Image: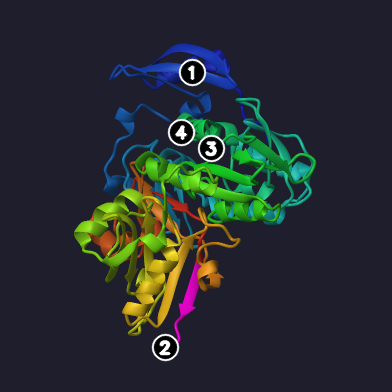
């Protein structure tokens, strides 16, 4: 059913009858009105449908207490829905729970009061009852976005790409229908903010200044005739791609949790290695990122030191911590065994071992079992890793070693672990971090017993960790998982 289009006279009458003054009417994809609230004098823009049909009003009219809002919801729908979020304003999304299906969703309070339904159940019902063809998909798009998107291609199935057009910017792109129906929108407008583009250009500029081979920006690799995957920075001579991942726009609000891994695997099958740089790494540890990129691109200008000329000895936290903070992308750790490699009395490499961590899935720890936690160098120490590993095994009671290599940075091909007799045990599933203020935090710091202290105003026993964190200013971003290596030492 087509939405009612109000005439200028109908709009003017409705605005004035509710205590507002109509300032102007103009077109911007659809009718927009500028109105002034006579009571407080605030001027703002809205759409006639929101003002007339949905009761969208000035914020000074819509403020209410949490208790009043919860009562308003209960009077409207009974106990079918629960208000989980903290009500602030009618136009600020909060978390609701549909007690029938048990799922949660975010919605503006004013929209919920105007149309109290569960978005999950509504979509599922539409999906189950409608004939699934191009006309059906167009109906779903119209229900979700009205006339903001145009379906250009033919619907072949939920997992086959279809061509779409975003009316506002005119951009045409390919998307899986299922992804669109669950929230994925125009990649040009909704997923690439100006700040991310600026930082991505900084990475590109660094590569251009230091690498002499061919460099391609935003290189597309087509899957079918019209659908494609894109690499931010591609070096065809080395078959290496560099991706810059903004913490907010690459969070699971916009990307599925396997997005980074899926992209890595797609290009792995084409013989291309993908490196993922998270935004906070470039902002907060840029020197380390640049050094790692130079090493991977084989353009490192670090002084070369041969391990046969170095001396290894145990070091203290005073020596270890600043070195790792400066030269390891994960920073320092809480290690039990701390080894330093010296060249002409200068510390040039650090290797540390710790007890196996519960946060990484270890339930029990046996005497002699260790995790190789950190290895970092300030120079190009040839043979340094091998020499330090042998020293540790020879001088400490180590029977078993596990270590983790971040798949965002590490190669699946032959690497330092392969050449030192480690065995690849498995590739772990993607891990998630929480981020805020351009910094990531390990998920272990956000367990439910900790959240009760961190967010006492939000915490509720019946909520999951994700449901609680979705009400905070933190975003959740997933990595590619880890290469998990093991070594058993026979004594």
Residue range of the region highlighted in magenta in the rendering: 484-491
- Frontmost of labels 3 and 2 is 2
| Disc 3/disc 4 C-alpha distance (Å) | 14 Å
Mark 3 vs 2: CB contact within 8 A: no
Specify which label sits upstream in the sequence, 3 or 4: 3
Q: Secondary structure at mark 3?
A: loop
Residue appearing at x 45%, y 86% in the figure? 490
| Disc 1/disc 2 C-alpha distance (Å) | 80 Å
Does residue 80 appear anywhere in the picture? Answer: no
- Left or right: 219 in relation to 301: right
Q: Quadrant of residue 36?
A: top left
Location of mark 3 (residue): 191
Q: Residues within 10 Å of mark 3 (few under 14, many from 20)?
A: some
| Disc 4/disc 2 C-alpha distance (Å) | 51 Å
Mark 4 vs 2: CB contact within 8 A: no
Mark 1 vs 4: CB contact within 8 A: no
Location of mark 1 (residue): 33
| Disc 3/disc 2 C-alpha distance (Å) | 54 Å
Location of mark 2 (residue): 491
Location of mark 4 (residue): 199
Specify which label sits upstream in the sequence, 1 or 4: 1
- Frontmost of labels 1 and 2 is 2
């Amino acid at each position: 059913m087509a939405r009612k289009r109000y005439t200028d006279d109908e709009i003017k009458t409705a605005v004035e009858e509710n205590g507002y003054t109509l300032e102007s009417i103009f077109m911007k994809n659809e009718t927009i009105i500028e109105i002034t609230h006579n009571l407080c004098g605030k001027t703002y823009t809205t759409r006639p449908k929101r003002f007339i049909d949905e009761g969208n009003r000035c914020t000074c009219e819509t403020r209410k207490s949490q208790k009043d809002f919860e009562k308003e919801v209960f009077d409207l729908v009974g106990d079918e829905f629960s208000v989980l979020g903290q009500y602030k304003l009618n136009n600020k999304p909060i978390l609701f729970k549909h007690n029938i299906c048990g799922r949660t969703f975010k919605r503006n309070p004013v929209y919920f009061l105007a149309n109290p339904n569960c978005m999950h159940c509504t979509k599922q019902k539409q999906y189950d009852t409608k004939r699934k063809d191009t006309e059906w998909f167009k109906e779903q798009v119209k229900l979700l976005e009205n006339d903001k998107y145009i379906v250009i291609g033919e619907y072949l199935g939920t997992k086959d790409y279809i061509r779409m057009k975003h009316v506002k910017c005119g951009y045409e792109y390919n998307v899986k229908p299922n992804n669109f129906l669950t929230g994925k929108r125009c990649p040009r407008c909704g997923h690439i903010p100006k700040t991310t583009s600026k930082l991505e250009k900084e990475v590109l500029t660094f590569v251009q200044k230091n690498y002499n081979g061919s460099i391609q920006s935003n290189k597309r690799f087509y899957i079918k005739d019209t659908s494609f995957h894109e690499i931010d920075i591609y070096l065809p001579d080395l078959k290496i791609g560099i991706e810059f991942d903004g913490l907010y726009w690459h969070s699971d609000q916009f990307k599925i949790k396997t997005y980074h891994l899926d992209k890595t695997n797609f290009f792995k099958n084409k013989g291309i290695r993908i490196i993922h740089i998270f935004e906070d790494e470039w902002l907060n540890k840029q020197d380390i990122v640049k050094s790692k990129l130079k090493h991977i691109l084989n353009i490192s200008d670090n002084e070369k030191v041969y391990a046969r000329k170095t001396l290894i000895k145990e070091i203290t936290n005073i020596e270890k911590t600043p070195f790792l903070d400066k030269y390891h992308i994960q920073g320092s750790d809480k290690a039990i065994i701390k080894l330093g490699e010296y060249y002409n009395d200068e510390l040039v490499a650090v290797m540390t071992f710790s007890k196996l961590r519960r946060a990484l899935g270890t339930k029990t720890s046996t005497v002699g079992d260790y995790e190789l936690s950190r290895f970092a160098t300030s120079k190009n120490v040839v043979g340094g890793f091998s020499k330090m590993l042998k020293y540790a095994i020879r001088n400490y009671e180590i029977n078993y070693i596990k270590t983790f290599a971040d798949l965002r940075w590490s190669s699946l091909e032959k690497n330092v672990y392969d050449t030192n007799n480690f065995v690849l045990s498995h590739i772990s599933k993607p891990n998630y971090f929480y981020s805020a203020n351009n910094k990531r935090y390990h998920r272990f710091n956000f367990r439910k017993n900790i959240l009760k202290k961190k967010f006492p105003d939000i915490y509720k026993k019946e909520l999951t960790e994700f449901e609680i964190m979705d009400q905070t200013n933190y975003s959740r971003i997933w990595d590619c998982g880890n290469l998990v290596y093991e070594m058993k030492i026979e004594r």
